[in-house]
Amino acid sequence: MLRRESEEANPSGHARDGTLGGHTSWAPAWAPAGGFTRARGGKFTGVDEVWDLVIVGGGPAGSAAALRAKQLRPQARVLLLDRADFPRDKACGDGIAAHGRDELALLGVPDLIADYRPTRRLSVISPGGAHVCATVARPHHVVPRVVFDARLVDAARARGVEVRRHRVRTLAVHPGHVVLDGTVTARAVVAADGANSAVRRLIGVAPAPDRHTAIAVRGYADLPADDDVQLIAMQKEGWPAYAWSFPIGDGTANVGFGMLLPRLRATGLPGREVLHGRLAALLPHLPARDLRAHHLPLSPGRPVPGAGRVMLAGDAAGLVNPLTGEGIYYALLSGRLAGAAAVQAAGDPLPAYRRALGKALGRHLRTTDVLARAAQAPGFIDAAIGTAARRKEVFDLLVDVGLGAGTVPLGLGCAVAGRWLLNGLRGRGRGG
Ligand SMILES: Cc1cc2nc3c(=O)[nH]c(=O)nc-3n(C[C@H](O)[C@H](O)[C@H](O)COP(=O)(O)OP(=O)(O)OC[C@H]3O[C@@H](n4cnc5c(N)ncnc54)[C@H](O)[C@@H]3O)c2cc1C
């Protein structure tokens, strides 16, 4: 259990032993507001008064930042704040792509989800009914977030990260440091506080516009334990929209339905009615319980990585694949890069983080941005899935673009566009 610092601390914010949260690095109760002593010019007088890195949010992005910072600099003082106690649930499809497992290995926790059954088959039905079912190049995993996130936080704690329950509400930027809620002082901050990031708002970075926001509901359903096919069933009505069934391997599956926010609003119906209704209509054989919905900030192609000493990671940076809604891999990757920048470029981490993020995902994000625009026309996706059904290397590439950091070679882009055009002409011919 995390400590309830914000709710239970006394009004001064200091624990009874004269330290904040009992951590020896904090200034005593007689320190000035802000919990630290300063020399003239705003410089700190002692090294023990400030956290090297404070991370807001203990989802995959936040835990990855914490793990990486301690991996690279074990003596770094790293504080992870989350408003929730762990284990905590999170509305998600629970699908962890092979790329996500690569990230776990880089973070030094390669076996974190090794006890979960790998999923090798993926079946996709396009809005117009094109169908592909094939074995993926590398298996995926489905791990309930209530388990996955708690394991990551535990791993960070085991590496020496201080973990506290605390909801961040305010942020003050000073030369050389940042103060959170008037009491927590950091040389660098990683904002990993999710889709509705308070920190992003506090540093003045705009949230994803509605046209780049999706909303999805997830639940759990029973299905035979030997069913190991991940299913994605796209829907023409209100496109882009799709339902999924991701078997966990224990006789249950994570099932859900998601669509773009403007398309949901255009129905004029209550969101719950639309999301729950379409999920039930698309997967009638899998009645879902424990339904829970959340927004997804889809990547705009060139995300803003932060401001000053605050780096945005994961959903807080709008790093969700606009074609699939996948975000765990990007959360782990961006968190890892932000954690590295915080300790390796401590003087000015943001430029280092921006560069690393651009190198790792720049081309991919621009690719998915272009593809997401093209995919507004369901015929484009029909053509892409139709091509993938005939050519395994195209199937593999689509998986890499939808769930990893893949890009599309020009030749393939032209082949899909050509097929799209041809389908359109055939359709018109039949119509006339
Ligand atoms: C229905 C649905 C299905 C999805 N399915 C998939 C899928 O199958 N695969 C996939 O890869 N992605 C999926 N995604 C996307 C994925 O869930 C996110 O991209 C991922 O959770 C992002 O991780 P994160 O660490 O950035 O944020 P989060 O996981 O949202 O974690 C943010 C953390 O910050 C904490 N927090 C928030 N505000 C504060 C505050 N002010 N102070 C302190 N703490 C705070 C929260 O308690 C939370 O623990 C899905 C999303 C939805 C909504």
Image (spheres, rainbow, N blue to C red):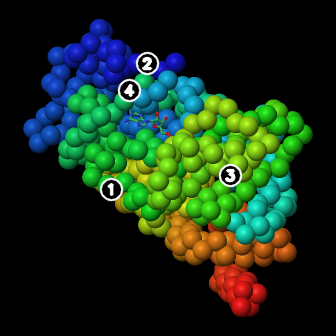
User: Which residue is the site of mark 4?
Assistant: 166
In this rendering, is residue 364 above or below 104? below
- Give me the C-alpha separation between circle 2 and circle 4: 8 Å
| Quarter holding residue 82 | top left
Which of the pair 26/408 is nearer the observer? 408
Which of the pair 291/177 is nearer the observer? 291
| Secondary structure of residue under mark 1 | loop
**Amino acid of disc 3:** Ala
- Give me the C-alpha separation between circle 1 and circle 3: 29 Å
User: Which residue is the site of mark 2?
Assistant: 3
Q: Nearer the viewer, mark 2 or mark 3?
A: 3
User: Which residue is the site of mark 3?
Assistant: 243
**Amino acid of disc 2:** Arg
User: Which residue is the site of mark 1?
Assistant: 206
- Give me the C-alpha separation between circle 1 and circle 2: 31 Å
**Amino acid of disc 1:** Ala
Q: Count neighbours of disc 2 (C-alpha within 10 A) and say few if under 14, some if 14 to 19, many if 20 or more.
A: some
Q: Nearer the viewer, mark 1 or mark 3?
A: 3
Identify the residue at image location x=53%, y=73%.
Answer: 373
| Quarter holding residue 51 | top left
The percent coordinates of residue 348 (x first, y second) are 32, 53
Q: Count neighbours of disc 1 (C-alpha within 10 A) and say few if under 14, some if 14 to 19, many if 20 or more.
A: few
Which dot marks residue 430?
none
- Sequence-first tag of 3 and 4: 4
User: Horizontal placement of 329 versus 389: left or right?
Assistant: left
- Give me the C-alpha separation between circle 3 and circle 4: 35 Å
Identify the residue at image location x=31%, y=19%.
Answer: 20
| Secondary structure of residue under mark 2 | strand
